[in-house]
Amino acid sequence: METDEAQDYQLETLAVRAGQVRTPEGEHSEPIFQTSSFVFKSAAQAAARFKGDEPGNIYSRFTNPTVRTFQNRLAVLEGGEACVATASGMSAILATCMALMKSGDHLLTSRGIFGATTGLFNNYLAKFGVEVSFVPLTDLDVWWDSIRPNTRLLFLETPSNPLVELVDIRALANIAHEKGCLLVVDNCFCTPVLQRPLDLGADIVIHSATKYLDGQGRCVGGAVVGDQELVGKEVFGFLRTAGPTMSAFNAWIFTKGLETLSLRMRAISDNAQCLAEWLVEQPRVTKVYYPGLASHPQHDLAKRQQTGFGGIVSFELDGGREAAWRLIDSTRLISITANLGDTKTTITHPATTTHGRLTDEQREYAGIKQGLVRIAAGLEAVEDLKADLQRGFDALN
Ligand SMILES: *Cc1c(COP(=O)(O)O)cnc(C)c1O
């Protein structure tokens, strides 16, 4: 399907069809172009390609047809003009910052973003003269007040990890644009199936394709989506020069992952909703964090901004770290791992894993208590997941 036909189709159709360009072989499934370079018909054609006078492939660090299929499909799903695929989610963030920021610029980001993202900003961008500061995700007034004359990018994740807090993307996009900044949203937790930040005014969407886009825990990859100028030209320019490109094989896995993304996100959200409602009933649970619960402080925003509530459910146990570890260790089915976005449900103790490097004070500020447990729902039968967690609760008594 040509990508300019996108407006004629629904997201589920585009996820299966968009971006595919059949070769003369007539293959039904998308092929893998496992080649590093491409040949030219003549020296003149080579010269024209290198000069940019003729479009076409030269070398897979720049473009590759399999990678392009993934990029075009994801661009259409997010409603962006351009997509650049990267070797990982982190290299998507790196490429965005390297392409769009310079020494002396300021980056404003929400607290509690992915740990490696915080590390990239604080330890590496700072080294090259980019100022970084952090604000609470949900407080629009603090975002507004924290923007400086040299602020270039606002960066955030919504819902956040692991407490699933939200920010109003449209309101923040208005703030960013009024102050002359760009809004970058890491859309890893929702994917375009549940939330389309570009429609809400964001300038750039980041993905860790490693998570739900693959959806089966096989490959590491990432993507940047946005307009032709910022992403198609600037971010792509960095990528083709610096080289954290996605491989053709991984692009193929992610392309096929997109085909089932909608089904998976709905099923995963259903499982997470069931688990959240069940967890509320458990005597040892003092608090459940899930945007699909009416008790979530931003439940109305979640209903407005997202078309589903996603797969991440967190809960607090009375009994602190000891209780949390005992519950985790007493499960047999659910995988003990910090990863998410898999068909397999995972369980993790944020205070000693994903947020283990924070100081006690930073963790306190972020609201990550020792009794907090995070579940990333997968696709197993929800009765089996409940039974597995029940083993954990039984072990506490
Ligand atoms: C995993 C993750 C990343 C980093 O992605 P990688 O593919 O591991 O490099 C960035 N943001 C969020 C929200 C993530 O969950």
Image: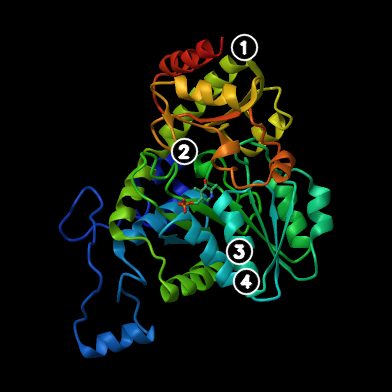
How far apart are the alpha carbons under marks 2 and 1? 25 Å
Q: Which residue is mark 1?
A: 281
Residue 65 on image: x %, y %: 30, 63
Label for residue 123?
A: 3
Residue 357 on image: x %, y %: 60, 47
Please state if 370 lies on the left or on the right of 8 as rendered: right
How many other residues sit within 10 Å of disc 2, few (<14), some (14-19) or many (≥20)? many
How many other residues sit within 10 Å of disc 3, few (<14), some (14-19) or many (≥20)? few
Relative height, residue 10 to residue 183 (above, below): above
Asked if the residues shown at circle 4 and circle 3 are in contact, with their CB atoms under 8 angstroms apart, the answer is yes
Whether the residue under disc 2 has CB within 8 Å of ligand 1: yes
Label for residue 340?
A: 2
**Label 3 vs 2, first from the N-terminus:** 3
Q: Amino acid at mark 1?
A: Glu
Q: Nearer the viewer, mark 1 or mark 4?
A: 4
How far apart are the alpha carbons under marks 4 and 3? 6 Å
